[in-house]
Image (cartoon, rainbow, N blue to C red):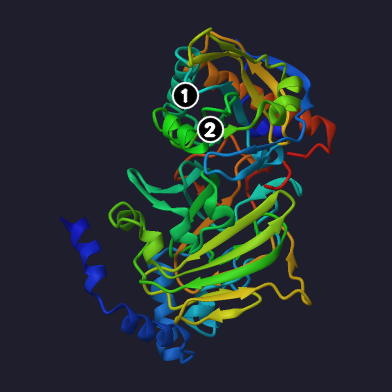
Amino acid sequence: MLLTAERELPPPTVATLLEGGAQLPKVQLIDKMGQHFNTPDLSGKFSLLFFGFTHCPDICPLTLNVLANMHNDWATPTIAVPEVVFISVDHTRDDPSTITNYLENFNSTFQGLSGSLEALDPLLKSLGVLVHTQHQPGEQFYTVTHNPTIYVISPEQKLIAVFSPPHEAKTIASDFLSIRQHYFKSKVGHSKQPTS
Amino acid sequence: MRRSLAVWAQYILPQRLMSIVIYHVTRCTWPALKNPLIKWFHKYYRVNLDEAQEGDPAKYESFNAFFTRGLKNGARPMAGDENTLISPVDGYLTQFGVAKNGALIQAKGISYSVKELLGETTGLAQLTQVSYATLYLSPSQYHRVHLPLSGRVTRTRYIPGKRFSVNEVTASSIQGLYCHNERVITWFETNVGEMALVLVGALNVSSISIRWLGEIISGKPKVWNENKNQVQRYERGEEIGRFNLGSTVIMIMPPETLIWHSGLEQGQKINVAERIGTLVSTPKQA
């Protein structure tokens, strides 16, 4: 059975597992190529979702840098590295080409999505992401306050775990492996047990 | 020095002509020719005939019949159940794992593109990460290819090419080796998504045989699409093809569809129907 297929890993040290997981609602967004992207496009792989905006001065670049390091230093050749999905909550300034150029600074394989706050709303609500746009009086520049959380999404588009800051590349990698194993174990537990 | 000469020699040998000659010699049924050849091969490569259906080398009607010999019933007991991914061949597991950035590892420091190997840019070829295993068959081994998990044939593609040897020395020397070589790729629709099985030809291999297409004769690139009136489904462990001389099989699947068996080691010897992974069903890629 599955337990014999992989060495048992300790539980995650930083991430919080969400037993059973929560199905993501269907939302239609735009990917970094300017194409429609629906939640089911996340199927078949694990994803790490992170919300932010390209004008962000601190949390976004720091977190994306950590995730880029996690990708580059991935040391488990038998397991796929989770896909990093950056979702912009600043649709006005972040068009697909801006997002593409921005992500090039970190890792060009990262997916970048955007959508109006109305389009994003069901997703933000279901994950508990708070977004607050702050305009400074008399200034064109504005900032967007958002959660620094990283959301772990299963191949069935369920939220299965969350990482709260501070984020660290090595811990995200090792905790992800535990989360993934836990997910597959619980799946096998619910279906027919394969014999070994 | 010996190493580079052996590799270099493969560039200048008239491969097509050699293949034609070898094709006829290996199919020859004349005992005065085939018996000494089989005898030499049997001894030189220490072929184990104890597990073969026919234990007497002289009883094979040609060298090719000997080379593609069948095994006794029960010689390769099937591991696990339908959720167990099994080895498709008797061979050496030269590489396995998850490939990043659409590139498979050929040998240390050498990688090649999944798109080039498969000769297309959609489906599995467009995924940035794929699960894969590369298995090398040495000349003495059993040369029939079996299905690692049950599935329905969706299409088969033949890509012509050179026929370099695929042994370890060559694999660590020629860039993109498996993409230079003649190969036959079959795509299967399985319970966990699409799987591509690539049969790579090797030096001297005059052909690859596919169970439902017969012997594939070298020539122009070709694709056989699924015949909707005649669905071909094969079960895990069923024979699906033969190599008519040593070669390599590459198995490609989407990521997160299987967990590699923790006991596997790169380069280890493995037999048909032994466990290589456990399948985890996830919905197909949207």
The residue identified by callout 2 is A81
Mark 1: secondary structure: helix
Q: Which residue is rendered at x = 64% and y = 51% of the image?
A: B86
Whole-angstrom CA distance, mark 2 to mark 1, is 9 Å
Is residue B89 visible to the viewer in this orientation of the structure?
yes
Q: Nearer the viewer, residue B247 or B110?
A: B110
Figure check: A36 above or below A175? below
Q: Residue A148 appears in which quarter of the rendering?
A: top right
Other-residue count near label 2 (Cα within 10 Å), few / some / many at <14 / 14–19 / ≥20 = many
The amino acid type of the residue labelled 1 equals: Met
Q: Which image quarter is the N terminus of chain A in?
A: top right
Q: Is residue B112 left or right of residue A130?
A: left
Q: Where residue A70 is drawn, which disc sits there?
A: 1
Figure check: A150 above or below A192? above
Q: Is residue B150 left or right of residue B197?
A: right
Is residue B137 visible to the viewer in this orientation of the structure?
no
Figure check: A47 above or below B190? above
Q: Nearer the viewer, residue A87 or B281?
A: A87
Q: Nearer the viewer, residue A184 or B236?
A: A184
* Labels 2 & 1 near each other (Cβ < 8 A): yes
Q: Which residue is rendered at x = 28% and y = 54% of the image?
A: B173
